[in-house]
Image (cartoon, rainbow, N blue to C red):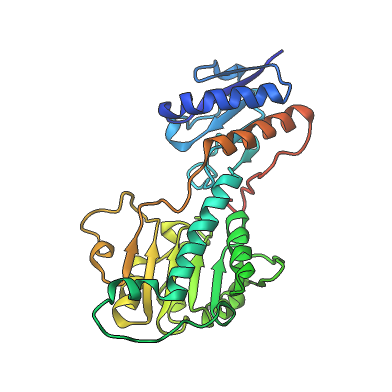
Amino acid sequence: MPVNILFSARPALWPVYQPLLTQGLKDAGLDFTLATDLAADEVDYVVYAPNGGLSDFSPYTRLKAVLSLWAGVESIVGNDTLTVPLARMVDHGLTQGMTEWVVGHVLRYHLGIDRHITGQDGIWIPDPPPLASQRRVAVLGLGALGRAAAQALAALNFNVTGWSRSPKSLAGVICLHGADGLCAALSSAEIVVLLLPDTPATENTLNAETLALLPKGARVINPGRGALIDDEALLSALDSGQIGHATLDVFRTEPLPPEHPYWSHPNVTVTPHIASETRPETAAQVICENIRRGEAGEPFLHLVDRTLGY
């Protein structure tokens, strides 16, 4: 009997993913049916994105797993009708893209590139930056994306502290956890990078209290989730000079409304959620591997812990 796989995502993605998934499933030696309109009681796996329209999983009585195309699962993790394993997307193409974006913006702040680009006013100021080993960077979140970014920065000799809610260990990175660890990580960070998931426990990780812990003039980089930052608190910290500059790629409302004060603030750089994205070529490989594992009775990759929300 063939494995029946339902593709539930934006219709525009079907012609992109269909040939990639088809080839990957063939390479895995599977007998399969891949479609966008299978009968619910015949579906074994759902390749899922939140904007695909599927929200009620109760009719899918023989479903073995839901395999998300998105790294973030906050919109589905609390769905009471979903009782089978849920795997989030951990895609090495997405990870590489995020690492490049984070390293680029950390280097931009470290080297003072903005000042040199905008400050060509005829005044010669020989003020070289310190070496990377003298620059303290905190990466909040040590999942797949945070680990990769922290290790890339450490490889460039930045003084990197990583923080997570539970204990982690990472070569070349000082790893802290828990509430006390967050205070310690922020208290010395000249540049802070947010790569936490969006959960009730991580909302407003940067707020008036935690922003005040950072050294005056610290820089904030957020390619993680918009809800990680209390926007009003950040704007106030920017106005006071407590935070020197913020580069923000994600927001509570997207696209960011034209009237939002981030657009016009002189010490904010807005990028339009471009830090990284799921690459179909590599994401399809992850999906096919998980289906192969499911059919072979092996553990799925990147399973979501419903109690933690990611």
- The residue lying toward the viewer, choosing from 5 and 248, is 248
- The x, y position of residue 21, in whole percent, is 59, 26
Residue 43, placed above or below residue 125: above
- Report the residue at 58% width, 28% height from top: 46
- Report the residue at 56% width, 68% height from top: 139
The answer to whether 263 appears left or right of 48 in the picture is left
- The residue lying toward the viewer, choosing from 60 and 106, is 106
Answer with the quarter of the image where residue 142 lies: bottom right
- The x, y position of residue 196, in whole percent, is 53, 60
Q: Would residue 247 be visible to someone looking at this image?
A: yes
Which residue, as the protein is rendered here, is positioned at the far right?
297
- Report the residue at 62% width, 27% height from top: 45
The answer to whether 134 appears left or right of 265 in the picture is right
Residue 174, placed above or below residue 5: below
- The x, y position of residue 25, in whole percent, is 66, 24
The answer to whether 127 appears left or right of 189 in the picture is left
- The x, y position of residue 134, in whole percent, is 56, 82
Residue 37, placed above or below residue 292: above
Tally of numbered discs: 0
Q: Would residue 90 be visible to someone looking at this image?
A: no
Which residue, as the protein is rendered here, is positioned at the far top?
1
- The residue lying toward the viewer, choosing from 41 and 117, is 117
- Report the residue at 27% width, 76% height from top: 120
Image quarter (top left, top right, bottom left or bottom right) of the N terminus: top right
